[in-house]
């Protein structure tokens, strides 16, 4: 059996708000819909409010290019206000592990560092979709950064 090829997405964002405030925004699972691009039609399937903690599971639904996708994420690590890790248990990827790190910025504020390790399904055939997936993830993270800047910093 051939294991899927892993890919990495890295992103860094600086915000003016203090780390505790930024982490608190992420600790509210309901805010996920606020930073997800509207064209993905994000809907929370887990009952809200949801307590974010190690071991918490979050179910939600998306639509990508008209295709409905269900996703179940596990909060694998939870260390406020420093970092947390969510991992896809069920969803469109063969693997998805997203590490969110929060650090005090050099001039105050907060730096958010995101590392996503992902693998496409149906390896090796699924790799043909990699350019499309990379573009979509770049658009998703660009939207997320604009939304966070607006919602948290008011920029």
Image (cartoon, rainbow, N blue to C red):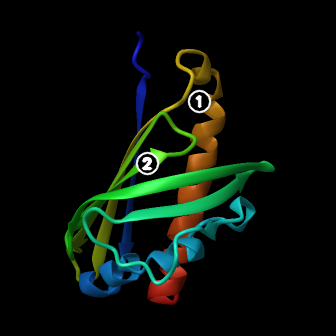
Q: Is residue 25 above or below residue 113?
A: below
Residue 135: % across, % down: 62, 43
Estimate how packed mark 2 is, as few (under 14), some (14 to 19) or many (20 or more) residues with alpha carbons within 10 Å. many
Q: Would you name the residue on which mark 2 appears?
A: 88
Closer to us: mark 1 or mark 2?
2
Task: State whether residue 61 is above or below residue 3.
Answer: below
Residue 14 figure quarter: bottom left
Q: Find residue 18 and report its image quarter.
A: bottom left
Q: How many marks?
A: 2
Q: Which mark is residue 39?
A: none
Q: Quadrant of the N terminus?
A: top left
Q: Residue at x 62, y 31 (%)?
A: 131
Find residue 6 and report its horizontal and vertical position in percent: 40, 29
Q: CA distance from mark 1 to mark 2?
A: 18 Å
In the displayed image of the protein, which residue is found farthest to the front? 47
Marks 1/2 in contact by CB < 8 Å: the verdict is no
Could you tell me which secondary element the residue under label 1 belongs to?
Answer: helix
Q: Residue furthest top?
A: 1
At 28% across and 62% down in the image, what residue appears?
Answer: 55
Q: Residue at x 71, y 68 (%)?
A: 38
Q: Is residue 77 left or right of residue 17?
A: left
Residue at disc 2, secondary structure: strand
Numbered mark located on residue 130 in the image: 1
Position of residue 80 in the picture relative to residue 63 (left or right): left
For the point 58% across and 73% down, the residue is 33
- Is residue 48 shown left or right of residue 43? left
- Mark 1 vs 2, N-terminal side: 2
Mark 1 residue crowding within 10 angstroms, few (<14) / some (14–19) / many (20+): few
> How far across and how far down the image is residue 8, in percent?
39, 38
- 39 w.r.t. 147: above or below: above
């Amino acid at each position: 059996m051939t294991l899927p090829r892993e890919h990495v997405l890295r992103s860094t964002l600086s915000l003016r708000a203090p780390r505790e405030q930024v982490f608190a925004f992420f600790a509210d699972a309901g805010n996920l819909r606020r930073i997800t691009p509207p064209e993905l039609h994000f809907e929370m399937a887990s009952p809200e409010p949801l307590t974010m903690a190690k071991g918490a599971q979050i179910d939600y639904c998306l639509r990508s290019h008209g295709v409905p996708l269900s996703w179940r994420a596990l909060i694998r690590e939870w260390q406020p206000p420093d970092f947390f890790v969510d991992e896809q248990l069920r969803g469109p990827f063969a693997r998805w592990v997203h590490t969110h790190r929060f650090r005090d910025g050099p001039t105050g504020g907060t730096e958010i560092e995101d590392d996503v390790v992902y693998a496409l399904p149906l390896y090796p055939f699924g790799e043909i979709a990699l350019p499309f997936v990379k573009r979509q993830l770049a658009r998703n993270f660009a939207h997320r950064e604009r939304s966070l800047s607006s919602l948290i910093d008011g920029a």
